[in-house]
Amino acid sequence: MYAPEEHYGNKEIYRYVRGLVSIEAAERMEAHMCDCDACLLKTVQVRHEMIQGCGKASRLLEGYLDETLNSTESVFVETHLILCDRCADEYGAIANGRPGHS
């Protein structure tokens, strides 16, 4: 198991993002990322570059607003919105179009 001061390498993160690790390894990595902002950010950046993160984030915005996403999806959307102005603007437009938002 990785201690918070240790970091996953690019190869490991690439394999995780591509779904090429076991369920157990993915769970260990996700637990590590809960305590390691550096690995979490690196993972989100790799995801963004590899799988056109905008499309995924866009599909998850309604669920994010409704708070129906799982923790991994929520963290993905939160971090993506920090990194991507276009999706942050889309999120704002959706949120502002809902009752109770100004």
Image (cartoon, helix red, strand yellow):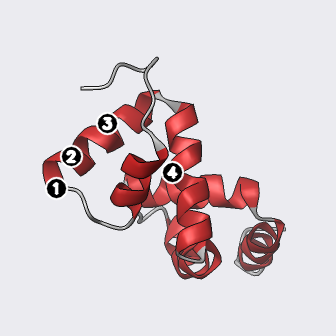
Residue at (51%, 42%) from the top-left corner?
Answer: 40
Give the label on residue 43, or none: 4
Binning the other alpha carbons within 10 Å of mark 2 as few (below 14), some (14 to 19) or many (20 upward) gives some
Split into 4 quadrants, where in the image is the N terminus?
Answer: top left
* Quadrant assignment for the C terminus: bottom right
Indicate which label's residue lies in the foreground, 2 or 3: 2
Q: Is residue 46 above or below residue 2?
A: below
| On screen, residue 95 above or below 26 | below
* Residue 66 shows in the view: yes
Q: Secondary structure at mark 3?
A: helix
Q: Earlier in the sequence, mark 3 or mark 1?
A: 1
Q: CA distance from mark 1 to mark 2?
A: 5 Å
Which residue is identified by label 1? 22
First in sequence: mark 4 vs mark 3 = 3
Going from N to C along the chain, the mark reached first, 4 or 2, is 2
- In terms of secondary structure, where does tag 2 sit? helix
- Which residue bears the numbered disc 2? 25
Q: Residue at position x 42%, y 21% from top?
A: 4
Q: Look at mark 3 in the image and give the residue it sits on.
A: 31
Cβ atoms under marks 1 and 2 closer than 8 Å:
yes
Q: Mark 3: which amino acid?
A: Ala
Residue 23 horizontal side relative to residue 48, left or right:
left
